[in-house]
Image (tube, rainbow, N blue to C red):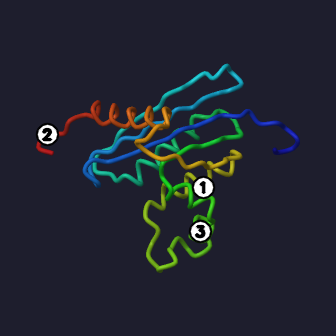
Amino acid sequence: MVSGVKKTRVVIYTDGGATPNPGLGGWGAVLISPAHGGARRELYGSEPGTTNNRMELTAAIMALRALKYPCAVDLYTDSAYMKNAFTRGWLDKWRNNGWVTSNKDPVLNRDLWEELFDLSLRHDINWHWTKGHASDELNNLCDALVQKAKSEAPKRENA
């Protein structure tokens, strides 16, 4: 809570993927507003020549960008990599070490990590992991949005 102002709670589910990896990618997100009777908003998009991790990060970025004001967010992802970067302090270590990993390799997708970090400063985010392609209805909906995004992607000639 900032300045004693209670933030609106929003539940977000995200997913992303690329086939092959790298290849045509899609991302999907579902935003739910408990304060508005569980109203839902679905977002999705695609990118050519991308990776699973870029699409996972893009899904979270696009969902958080869609919020008009700072919120208390429960964000569900099937990407342990993304969740752990925030909950295990990896992102802070990368930033403090000049965007290199503990193995001294450059952090991949730095542009997306930087944007996601900036968005995380605006919102109070509780990160949750959910098993992908399992019994979580909203994670499965996000996966369906990923597939929809890829199927609607413009077809490139001679690709």
The x and y percentages for residue 112 are 49, 54
Indicate which disc, 1 or 3, sits on the residue closer to the N terminus. Answer: 3
- Residue 95 tag number: 3
User: SS at mark 3?
Assistant: helix
On screen, 31 above or below 1? Answer: above
Q: In the rendered structure, are the residues bearing label 1 and label 3 in contact, judged by CB atoms less than 8 Å apart?
A: yes
Q: CA distance from mark 1 to mark 2?
A: 36 Å
Q: Residue furthest front?
A: 135
Indicate which disc, 1 or 2, sits on the residue closer to the N terminus. Answer: 1
Amino acid carrying label 2: it is Glu
Asked if residue 93 lies left or right of residue 154, the reply is: right
Residue under the point 57% across and 32% down: 31
Residue nearer the viewer, 142 or 70: 142
Q: Residue furthest left?
A: 158
Q: Where on the picture, by quarter, is residue 66?
A: top right
On screen, 6 above or below 101? Answer: above
Residue under the point 66% across and 41% down: 73
Q: CA distance from mark 3 to mark 2?
A: 40 Å
The x and y percentages for residue 108 are 43, 64
For mark 1, what is the residue?
117
Question: The C terminus lies in which quarter of the figure?
Answer: top left
